[in-house]
Structures are given as C-alpha cells and as structure tokens.
Image: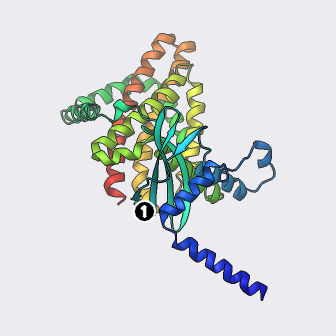
Amino acid sequence: MHRWWGGLLAVLLFAWAQAQGPVDLAREAVEHWLRGELTPATDMQELQGRTPEEIAELLRQTVAFPPPPPGLEVNLDEALVEDLPAGGVRVRFPAVSGPVGGEVVAVVREGKVLRVAWRPGDGLLPGWVKSSLTRIVFVAFSLLLLINLVRGGAARLWRVSLAWLAGYRRLYWFTNAILYGLFIFGALLAYAMPELAQALQEVVSGAIETIGLDEGAETGVSGLAWMIFYWNFSHGLLLTSFLPALLLGFPALLVNAARYYIFGFALSPAVIPWSVYVWHLPTLLIELQAYILVTFGGLVLFWETFKGGGYRAGLRYLGVTLLLGTLFLVAGAWYEALEILYLLR
C-alpha cells in the first residue's frame, strides 16, 4: 500500500512539474541558482578517478549553471520570454550586479531548465561595436574588397603575397598539416567520447550567448557579420595569434594547436548533425585558415630572426600574413552570418 501511495505521489509531482509554465520553471531554477544549489563545487582532485561520462556531466553542469557574481539582484517578477530556433524558450529576468545592469537568462526546453547564467547588458562586446555607424563602415569596407576582387586587384595582391612567401612554401604546408590535422584528430576523437564532446559543444554555445553575438542576428546579415568579424579579428587573430606570434612564433603555434584540437572535438559531427555540419564546415575552414596564416607568419619571423634578414625582416612577413588573414575573416564572417540566418533554418 505504501509503495502504491509513493508511486501515486511521484506521478502527481511529475504532472505538477509538467503543468508549470516555462516562466515558473525558470523562476524556480534562478532562485536555486542564486543560493548556489545548481553549480557543482568541484576541484581537480575530485576529478581524479572519475569516468569520462562523469567528467562530462560535471563540465556540463558547471557551464550550464556558472556561479552568479556576488551581490547579484534579480527581478523575478518581470520576465521576457522568446522562442528558440532549436526548440524551447529563453526566459530573461532583469538583474543588476553592482553598477552593471544586465539580465539573468534561463533556457527551458521540454519542461527542463537547461541553463541559467548572468549576462551583462552589452555582453562582452563594447557598445560602439553595436552601433549602426560601425556596421556601415564594415559593409563599405567589404564592398571595396569585393570591387577590388572583381577588378583583379585582390587577386594580384594574393599572387604577390604568395610569391613573396614562396621561399617558405614547405613551412606553410607544414603549418596547415599540423593545425588542420589536430582539428581532424579532435573531431574523430569525439566519436570515442561523445558525452564529453557534447559538454564542450555546450561550452561553445554558452560562450556565444555570453559574448552577445546572438544579438547580431536582430540587425540582419550585415550586423551579425560585423560582430562575428570584430570578435574573430580582435580576440582570435590579434590577441591570441598575432601578439603571441611576435614572440618568435612558437607561442602562437601552441595557442592555435590547442584551439584547433578543442574546436575539432567540440564541433565534431559526433555531436552535431551532418545536415548542420556540412553547412558549417566552410566557416571553419575559412576562419581557421586566417589563424593558420598568422601562425605561419610567426614561424617565418622566427626563421628570419636567426637565419635570415633579422627580426625586422620577419615582421614584414608577419604583417603580410596578418593582412591575408584579415581578408579570410571578412569572407568567413559574411558566410557565417548567411549560414546562421538562412542556411540552417
């Protein structure tokens, strides 16, 4: 009899949970999140001896429910609900962390809260990046490149650059083989550890939302392309490729080796449907080539410093690869924006 009542109670509780709307579920999850009940407290010692599945689940929980900033105040009485293309809804609550305004975002799908996170008002993008003026400048810059390409100027620049770099042709292909090879290796390894790969894929998705790139979709193809280009150029090409390359190349090689392996693992067809992966593969190949070029330029800088014309001569090579990498990022940003807004819908 007690088992019968226990089973009935479980069914009633499940039905009650299903009857709750997404806002109620999100509000309850945010309350638990603010009390620290959803974020797992783990350290490196606790990961020892765990299976890949357990590590993946801990990673997924940590990424899905990152700890709130100290003193975060959330207005749970006001909620903005929007549907997500992949299903489910995103519920936004106004919030304040000290002097910084923003929102707490909860993603709800099939009666389950998948993610809760604090998001500053502008994300990680500066306010000026979201202005219409910078978007117009980017569109004009892209049109000038396109006109130059049609008239053959870009093609001549490409041929002159390749001729100048011809003496390091083998080093260029070696850099491609190493970095694209790590990308492919990561994609294949994901089939052996799909749970961990899925967790990393969610890390990438959460990072995109935190950065604020999803807001670019509201401004159309040009706005999204500009935001993608800005982030990839400033944080991908300059900060984590060009600046390390100035230290005689090898730091850039190490940074991008880790980047390519993680990208291959997290964006593998093992966790992404082939119907999506096929459309996204050109984005990966184009944008990753930009980082390969600058990494290659850093290795040329190393060789020129010790075997060629010196550090200053090597800087000229690195500068050329930075220019070529920028052109690749412009093309990749426009394609990725079209892919997100049209090809994947």
Residue 264 image position (x, y, % from top left): 55, 48
Count of numbered circles on the image: 1
Work out which quarter of the rendered image holds the C terminus and state it. Answer: bottom left
Q: Residues within 10 Å of mark 1 (few under 14, many from 20)?
A: few
Residue flagged by tag 1: what amino acid is it? Ser
> From the viewer's perspective, is residue 326 above or below residue 10?
above
Rendered image coloring scheme: rainbow
| 3 left or right of 142 in image | right
| 78 left or right of 342 in image | right
Kindly identify which residue carries mark 1. Answer: 275
Q: Nearer the viewer, residue 206 or 26?
A: 26
Residue 228 image position (x, y, % from top left): 39, 40
Which residue is found at the position 56% from the left and 19% from the top?
248
Residue 296 seen from this side: no
| 24 left or right of 338 in image | right
Residue situated furthest front in the rendering: 77
Residue 65 image position (x, y, % from top left): 60, 50
Residue 48 seen from this side: yes
Q: Quadrant of residue 144?
A: top left
> From the viewer's perspective, is residue 4 above or below residue 209?
below
Q: Nearer the viewer, residue 233 or 114?
A: 114
> From the viewer's perspective, is residue 109 above or below residue 141?
below
Residue 198 image position (x, y, % from top left): 58, 56
Q: Nearer the viewer, residue 86 or 154?
A: 86
Work out which quarter of the rendered image holds the N terminus and state it. Answer: bottom right
Which residue is found at the position 35% from the left and 44% from the top?
216
Q: Nearer the viewer, residue 338 or 213?
A: 213
Which residue is found at the position 29% from the left and 27% from the top?
157
The local secondary structure at tag 1 comes to helix
